Amino acid sequence: MSFLEWLLLVILVSFYIVCLFTVCSLTFKKGYTLLGVVGIFFPFLWLIGAILPAKPGSRFAVAQGMAQQAEVREYSR
């Protein structure tokens, strides 16, 4: 393999790892487990799962609700 091929491989693997820890984790937090698992082989599914609204009761939705309640409490003082 030439230097350019190695460089491209390193960049693509680095991008995959960054997506694994950011977009994939957001997909799981929003409650889309199937998209997260299948996204390991087809990473564009992680993007779809990250863009979709969170399922009710998911960790992301609960955290958002708690943050909104804290804001309301802060403003109503």
Image (cartoon, grey):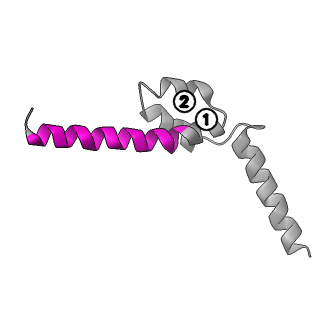
* Quadrant housing residue 4: top left
Determine crowd level at label 2: few under 14, some 14-19, many 20+ residues with C-alpha closer than 10 A: many
Q: Is 66 positioned to the left or the right of 55 in the image?
A: right
In the picture of the structure, the residue carrying the numbered disc 1 is 28
The answer to which of marks 2 and 1 sits earlier in the sequence is 1
Q: Is the magenta stretch mostly helix, strand or loop?
A: helix
Q: Where is residue 74 in the image (x, y as percent from the top left)?
A: 85, 71
User: Is 64 located above or below residue 72 in the figure?
Assistant: above
Is residue 34 positioned above or below 8 on the image? above
Identify the element where label 1 is drawn: helix
Percent of width and height locating residue 36: 54, 30
Relative image position of residue 15 (x, y in whole percent): 35, 43
Which label was assigned to residue 40?
A: none
Q: Which residues are the magenta region?
A: 3-24
**Residue at the farthest left position:** 2
Mark 2 lies on residue:
36
Q: Distance between the residues labelled 2 and 1?
A: 6 Å
Q: Which amino acid type is marked by label 1?
A: Phe
Please tell me in which quadrant of the rendered image residue 73 appears: bottom right
Q: Give the residue drawn at x 65%, y 39%.
A: 30
Q: State yes or no: discs 2 and 1 in contact (Cβ < 8 Å).
A: yes
Q: Nearer the viewer, residue 13 or 60?
A: 13
User: Residue 2: image x %, image y %?
Assistant: 7, 37
Residue 47 drawn above or below residue 32: below
Question: Seen in the image, is 49 located left or right of residue 56?
Answer: left
Question: Which residue shows up at 84% across the image and 59% down it?
Answer: 69
**Residue in the picture at 49% in, 42% down:** 21
